[in-house]
Image (cartoon, rainbow, N blue to C red):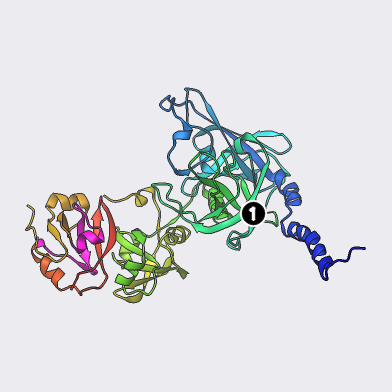
Amino acid sequence: MTKRAPGSALLLLLAMLLPLVSMAALPEFTQLVKQAAPAVVNITATRKAESRQFENYNEEEVPELFRRFFGNMPRQNAPRPSAGSGFIISEDGYILTNNHVVENASEILVALSDRRERMATLVGSDKLSDLALLKIDAQDLPMVKLGSSERLEVGEWVVAIGSPFGFEYSVTAGIVSAKGRSLPMEAEGNYVPFIQTDVAINPGNSGGPLFNLKGEVVGINSQIFTRSGGFMGLSFAIPIDVAMEVVAQLKDKGAVARGWLGVLIQRVDRDLAESFGMDRAAGALVTQVFANSPASKGGLREGDIIVSFDGKPIDLSSDLPHVVGRTRAESEVDVVVVRGNKRQTLKVKVGLLDVADIQAPGGPGIIDNSNLLGLDVRDLSADEQAALGLDKGLLVVRVTDGPGRAAGISRGDVITTINSEWVGSAKSFGEMVEKLPRDVAIPVRIVRNQRPEFLVIKVPQ
């Protein structure tokens, strides 16, 4: 009889049990899908005939970008349907989906899980959050359970149900990769802190629900990042907490009101943080304050770094639009800023956002070529001041080797402040530079292509 080595039986038992333990650690989705799928719908939106200007359009040739994913571009003069997903949020027929699924649609057809079809009416839509609320004539419908995106955690399992490429009620799963993502998608601005996942999402999933393991909706699948036109491991969902705030306003008024501050901002990196005397890179750096805006009336200035808004910390500049947009207009809030290496609290009355508010605004003096920055500058003409909306600033007409070039200043930039002080005339520019501290990071505010931003410069010894 063969004798086993001591402990070999235990090792054999562990080897047999290990696959079972691994399988037990994986989540089980079958019961979740059985309960949740009946409240998911397929949406077909028919748009009016359009021109043939994209007749030769090839989707595979689209460059890398964030894509809204709902069918192809128009190729012919005929009504063109687009397919997406949605989900029922009330027994009497309210349905939530993406705005881009039904935008400009002449007809919206909703297919229920039991194969019934109903024509839907558009209750209201919101382009900035990419949400639309539909209503069908039906009663006693299955409805989803709503969860909390605020309590959702990175690493948590999530499940998507939708109709990718028209394959109805397809189920995919993954984990939450990140929260609070800002996507540079639209010129109108960014007002959604997206949930990033690795759940497989493809054309047709738009507007479908994202569930947690409790079977609760925590997001609405809305965007993918792709080079190929299909899924590449990055998908983005609108948080359900944000969505339900929008739904409440769409039901009540058919439109969404958002808070407005009236500033342009940029990210604070390590060098900028050092130049403003901060021990870490955080906050939103104000590069421009619009005239007669809530920010202007509340005392905000260019060069302020907003670190808190209405009691909510602003760690990333991308946090600010989300927080301001969700603040009720006409409410007075505390805004904490870093100004002159010190913290200050300002009282600001939040305004009401209008589309026009989120669009970018729109005899020469002596040239100085002797300053330490390696910059030749001149005064702005009256016409240039009017075109740029500035009453102060110096135009950079030449850049030579020196700190200015190292900081990224280019010919055509307009310098407005140095070390938080407004520049004077070109004649006094060299004298102003001479007084700057040496080998210290100093913030310089410029206007480039009618957009203000801050750069960091160091004057050598």
Give the side of residue 303 with respect to residue 57, left or right: left
Nearer-the-camera pick, 439 or 41: 439
Q: How far across and down, in percent of the image, does residue 77 sit? A: 47, 22
Magenta extent: 402-426
Q: Mark 1 points at which residue?
A: 158
Question: Do we see residue 185 in this rendering?
Answer: yes
Q: Residue at (30%, 61%) from the top-left corner?
A: 287
Element type at mark 1: strand
Whether 132 is drawn above or below 433: the answer is above
Q: How far across and down, in percent of the image, does residue 150 sit? A: 58, 62
- Within the magenta stretch, is there residue 451? no
Identity of the residue furthest to the bottom in this view: 342
Question: Do we see residue 291 in this rendering?
Answer: no
Q: Residue at (44%, 29%) from the top-left corner?
A: 57
- Quadrant housing residue 284: bottom left
Nearer-the-camera pick, 282 or 350: 282
Q: How far across and down, in percent of the image, does residue 369 sit? A: 9, 60
- Within the magenta stretch, is there residue 405? yes
Nearer-the-camera pick, 447 or 329: 447
Whether 237 is drawn above or below 327: the answer is above
